[in-house]
Amino acid sequence: MFKKIYTPVDNSDISDKVVQEAIDLAKANGSQLRIAHVVNLKKINFEIEMVGVAELKDTLIGIANKLIDHIKVILKSKGMENAEVVLLENYGADLASLIADDAKEWGADLFVLGSHHLGSFSHFITGGVAEDIAHDTEIPILIITKHKQDL
């Protein structure tokens, strides 16, 4: 069915659930799995020498690498060491487009995405990366939500 499953994650509390669902689906289908995290560096201006810019970038990448390491531990515990885990650096591209382009280039045939399910007002204010990805791709999407009983 689905041979290449692409799962973007962030540092939110739903990411572990999304990873687990992606692992289960990949195992059930014998699929390849790619888990991606985007470190957003667009606020850092590297054209001007400023004190602390390099340190800020190192800190942000360090936080991202902690998440990557955490994901690798989960994958190893589930027997999925062969899954790809990638860190994408974003210097100003649209987040959803960056993820959709990476998935397309990798040849993904399914997204497994998390939705924070913030409600309509919060969604209106902050937007939704999952919804934006849906607008940027033709790849089918499985949405994993955090239900109230999971709180």
Image (cartoon, helix red, strand yellow):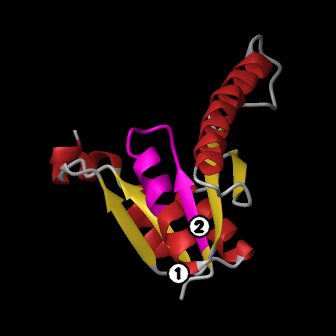
The amino acid beneath tag 1 is Ile
Residue 151, which numbered label? Answer: none
Quarter of the figure with the C terminus? top left
SS under mark 1: loop
Q: Earlier in the sequence, mark 1 or mark 2?
A: 2
Marker disc for residue 6: 2
- Type of the residue with mark 2: Tyr
Disc tally is 2
From where the camera sits, is residue 132 visible? yes
Q: Say which residue appears at 70% left-offset and 52% top-offset.
A: 85
Q: Residue visible at 60% across and 46% down?
A: 77
- Front residue of 83/63: it is 83
Q: Looking at the picture, tell me which residue is in the foreground, 44 or 142.
A: 142
On the image, which quarter does residue 18 sit in? bottom left
Question: In the picture, residue 98 is in which quadrant?
Answer: bottom right
Disc 2 element: strand
How far apart marks 1 and 2 lie (CA) works out to 10 Å
Q: Is residue 131 left or right of residue 56?
A: left
**Where residue 97 sits in the image (x, y, percent)?**
58, 64
Q: Which residues are magenta?
A: 5-22
Task: Specify whether residue 9 is painted magenta.
Answer: yes
- Relative to 135, say whether 17 is above or below: above
Spot occupied by residue 47 in the image (x, y as percentages of width and height): 81, 31
* Vertical arrangement, residue 102 with respect to residue 30, above or below: above
Instruction: Say which residue label 1 marks.
Output: 139
- Do residues under tags 1 and 2 come within 8 Å of each other at their CB atoms? yes
Left or right: 139 in relation to 37: left
Q: What is the crowding at mark 2: few (fewer than 14 residues within 10 Å), some, or many (at least 20)?
A: many
